[in-house]
Image (cartoon, rainbow, N blue to C red):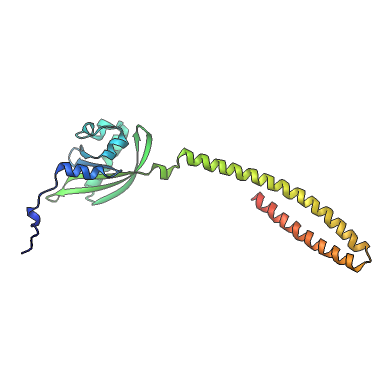
Amino acid sequence: MSGREPLHGRRQISEESLEAIVDTLSDMIWVKDAGELRFVLVNKGAEVLLGVSRDKLVGKSDYDLFSREQADAFVTRDREFLAGRQSVEVQEEEINTPNGVRVLRVRRYVIAEAGEPRYLLGISQDITDLKSPPAETIQNHSEAAQKLQAIGLLAGSFAHEFNDLLTVILTAAQTLLESSTDASEREDAGYIIASARRAASLTRELLALIRR
């Protein structure tokens, strides 16, 4: 025989140990009885999210904690889930907290006894910041957009002035090409014209990019 203790003879986990385990999770963990839908267990994450101490949550229903409209929505969702006899459900819900409206991704699980729902376990993850970036992030994006706009205006002004200079260079080089009889000068004028036209083409591409 092995020295391993039979499963039925092992000591069950204590309520204190269970509480310590669920308190290590940052998500809101809650358990309601399937009959009256009153909270029978909540973790530290629930206290932090709702701004209510544990002793004021246990034994309470949604109607004791939220507005009538919001409580109706939560209870209806719970009842429909229990009636559907599903094992797990994932929903996104909004909840009013001391820190404003938060968006939660809620996972519901049925804990059954003798084939009948006994408890409703919920794990509520706050995903508000994923839905709506923090104000600091929005501000950073706004500042970056303003900088890009300023760079675009500067580049546009530079491109127009550079294009004007290229026009002068092209005109002078074209005049030299048409009037000079010196082969070396005509060759140099040809190189200048080709280079200026290439520069003018790049300038047009830059202006097109800025206007997008």
The quadrant of the picture occupied by the N terminus is: bottom left
Please give left or right for residue 58 compared with residue 132 in the image.
Answer: left
Observer-nearest residue: 127 or 161?
Answer: 161
Q: Position of residue 65 (x, y in %)?
A: 27, 32
Q: Position of residue 64 (x, y in %)?
A: 25, 31
Observer-nearest residue: 143 or 66?
Answer: 143
- Using the rendered view, name the quadrant where residue 190 is placed: bottom right
Q: Which residue is most to the bottom?
A: 183
Please give left or right for residue 178 compared with residue 56 in the image.
Answer: right
How many marks can you see?
0
Q: Position of residue 71 (x, y in %)?
A: 28, 35
- Using the rendered view, name the quadrant where residue 129 is placed: top left
Q: Which residue is most to the front?
A: 3
Q: Residue at x 14, y 51 (%)?
A: 115
Q: Residue at x 82, y 61 (%)?
A: 192
Observer-nearest residue: 123 or 156?
Answer: 156
Vertical arrangement, residue 84 with respect to residue 57, above or below: below
- Using the rendered view, name the quadrant where residue 123 is placed: top left
Q: Position of residue 198 (x, y in %)?
A: 75, 61
Q: Residue at x 10, y 49 (%)?
A: 11
Observer-nearest residue: 201 or 13?
Answer: 13
Please give left or right for residue 22 compared with residue 155 in the image.
Answer: left
Q: Residue at x 20, y 35 (%)?
A: 58
Q: Which residue is most to the left?
A: 1
